[in-house]
Image (tube, helix red, strand yellow):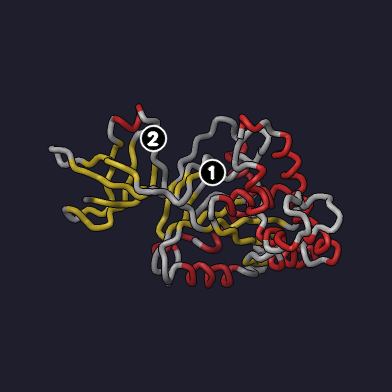
Amino acid sequence: MIKGLVTKCQGGLYTVLLDEKIDGEELVSVRGRGAFRHEKIVLLSGDRVELERNDDGSFFCKGILERKNSLIRPPLANLDYIFVVIPCKKPMPSLEVVDKMIAIAEYNKIEPVIIISKSDLDDQFAKEMYKIYKSSGFDAFITSSQSNEGVEDIKEYLLKITKEQDPICAFAGASGAGKSTLLNALFPKLSLETGALSEKIERGKNTTRTTELFSLREQLDGARGGYLADTPGFSLLDFERFDFFSLSDLLGTFRDLNAVSEQCRYTKCSHTKEQGCAILEKVKTGEIEKSRHQSYVALFEILKKKPTWKK
């Protein structure tokens, strides 16, 4: 059986990196079998697939191997790490939005890594943000495009995680967070757009962008494997209109809160207002960050109001 990794999807044509070269070719263009359309099966960048050859030597996708996860936007499968870029200022970050993104990642078994950017604009605030997420159990980095602070540390982190696996990684952040500038510093061969032009493209109402995987081995000197997803962004964070997970899943997406939830005196504690709740007690003492609990409560209220038939 011929197997490979989908690295790019464009219309009904897919680029697949073969596990083993065939006729000297490593990358091939394939189409899905006709039944995919009727079964509403959509191939995504990051999918592991099985291929077969037509009589004319061309390839078609016979099936998709089991996915670890799949996302709506960007259209991406089997993501392992998401590097969440949070600016100190310009624009001021919304920690609730950041925590929503982290919760979606946690639910999909994607490891969030926190990057605080633009530390040169407010070094003290950068350190406070670092403390919030480091103490909540996440790997975190402080960066500055002015001084190049943190870039080598992130490179070392990427080199470390590619030693024993071939992870698929993506960088996410609000427009203006400094994501493109950081990616250019990390991966100069990509030559990504930055500044006003990039922001204009991201805001375009009818812009269609392809999610493509790039080899970390080719982009980062010393990396043994893995892939970088060049994505149009993680923008569907509206929990009232979209279904990421249900209320019963919420606690499990906040690792710092979930770790102490069993200490509660109530078996059905909502961890929002109950007297004697172990989580609320640790928020009071500072062992759990206040902003993290506020984000949890905000999501709790949204998910609580959703009709069960929509979940």
Q: Earlier in the sequence, mark 2 or mark 1?
A: 2
Q: Quadrant of the C terminus?
A: top right
Could you say which is closer to the camera, residue 115 or residue 99? 99
Taking 226 as reference, is 107 left or right? right
Residue 221: x %, y % from top left: 43, 70
Residue 204: x %, y % from top left: 59, 34
Residue 134: x %, y % from top left: 69, 67
Can you tell which of label 2 and label 1 is closer to the viewer?
A: 2
Q: Residue at x 32, y 47 (%)?
A: 49
**Amino acid marked by disc 2:** Ile
What SS does tag 2 mark? loop
What is the quadrant of residue 157 in the picture?
bottom right
Taking 49 as reference, is 204 left or right? right
Crowd band around label 1 with a 10 angstrom C-alpha radius: few (<14), some (14–19), many (20+): some
Q: Residue at x 64, y 33 (%)?
A: 308
Q: Residue at x 77, y 52 (%)?
A: 271
3D distance between C-alphas at marks 2 and 1: 22 Å
**Amino acid marked by disc 1:** Pro
Say which mark, if any, is on residue 41.
2
Say which mark, if any, is on residue 97.
none
- Would you say residue 268 is visible in this rendering? yes
Could you say which is closer to the camera, residue 112 or residue 222? 112
Label 1: which residue? Answer: 232
Number of disc labels? 2
Q: Is residue 303 above or below residue 264?
A: above
Residue 113: x %, y % from top left: 60, 61
What SS does tag 1 mark? loop
Q: Is residue 197 above or below residue 229?
A: above
Crowd band around label 2 with a 10 angstrom C-alpha radius: few (<14), some (14–19), many (20+): few
- Would you say residue 91 is visible in this rendering? no
